[in-house]
Amino acid sequence: MKQFDKSVGVSSSANGEAFEVETRVKSNDEVNGEYRLLILDAPQKVLDCQPGQFFHLLCPVTSQNAPYLRRPMSIYGFYPEKSELHFLYKVTGEGTRALAELLPGDTFNVLGPLGKGYSIRDDWQQLLLVARGVGLATLAPLAQEAQRRGRKLTAICSARSPEVLMSVELFREMGAEVITVTDAEGSSGMENIKAIIQDKIGAGEVDALYTCGSNRMLTLLQEIGAEHGIPGEIALEQQMACGLGMCQCCVRSFRRNNQIVHERVCREGPVFDMQEAMGW
């Protein structure tokens, strides 16, 4: 397959460069009643990724949908040995409706990898991640990296019901202890999740906390982290126009050194220190 690619000179990538490339769709299948998995055949240069980074996707124009701007989407998986790039998404608007119409063999333009991803310090040997719904997509590559580094991982996966729980088997394949909580079972409340995390901390099984997106989860983990002196990171979700840091569309406020500072989620993030992030 002949592919077009070029460096766009983007320094917002944690790896120093981002590339605009034409990929080819390998599959675009439903995972369950709410989510789809898009697998792309991608060139090696865009597969030098970090967990938590994202791509800016040029959604196709179809007879029913004509999205104007690119859509930012977290990386669900990157596999250089298979030349594959994976995205897990929920069909919610014009852009994702257009994505859902992609068929195997179609070409698809992506820009990335972009942004700053998650980090795993040398003294963070036992990691705990917690997220809900499609937010787990952002954390899936972190599980892969934890396994590669030989770290112990606990994943708390939350959803409305057991039928739409995401990434459970993937996390187990990565050697994680998986704890599932759902609204339908009455186990997904913040107090129960807090109790689960507190038990893990009491057993000495948490060196760092990770999450994505949820304001309630951010507030909870900030409280737990501050109480026990445990560091953490959060990948923030934000509307973006350019994805490169030029348009200032994704600026958010952070607490740092006793001041309020403003940074771009697409360039200085999307991953930030959990205690510096501010709720919304």
Image (tube, rainbow, N blue to C red):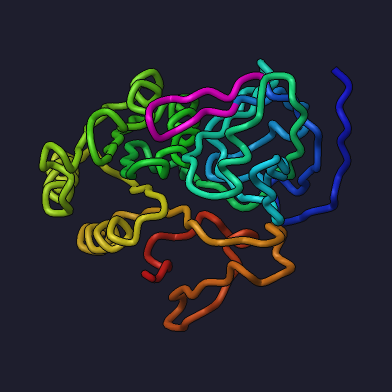
Q: Is the residue 196 above or below the residue 252 in the image?
A: above
Q: Position of residue 163 (x, y in %)?
A: 27, 28
- Quadrant of the rendered structure where residue 146 is? top left
Q: Position of residue 63 (x, y in %)?
A: 70, 41
Q: Nearer the viewer, residue 143 or 190?
A: 190
For the stretch drawn in magenta, the main secondary structure is: strand
**Residue at 65 percent of width and 60 percent of height:** 267
Q: Is the residue 46 above or below the residue 222 in the image?
A: above
The span picked out in magenta is: 26-38
Q: Nearer the viewer, residue 143 or 165?
A: 165
Q: Does the stretch in magenta take in 232?
A: no
Q: Is the residue 217 above or below the residue 118 in the image?
A: below
The reply, left or right, for residue 76 in relation to residue 230 is right
**Residue at 37 percent of width and 47 percent of height:** 210
The reply, left or right, for residue 267 in relation to residue 229 is right
Q: Quadrant of the N terminus?
A: top right
- Quadrant of the rendered structure where residue 263 is? bottom right
Residue farthest front in this picture: 63
The reply, left or right, for residue 277 in relation to residue 4 is left
- Quadrant of the rendered structure where residue 184 is? top left
Q: Does the stretch in magenta take in 28?
A: yes
Q: Position of residue 25 (x, y in %)?
A: 69, 24
Q: Is the residue 67 above or below the residue 176 in the image?
A: below
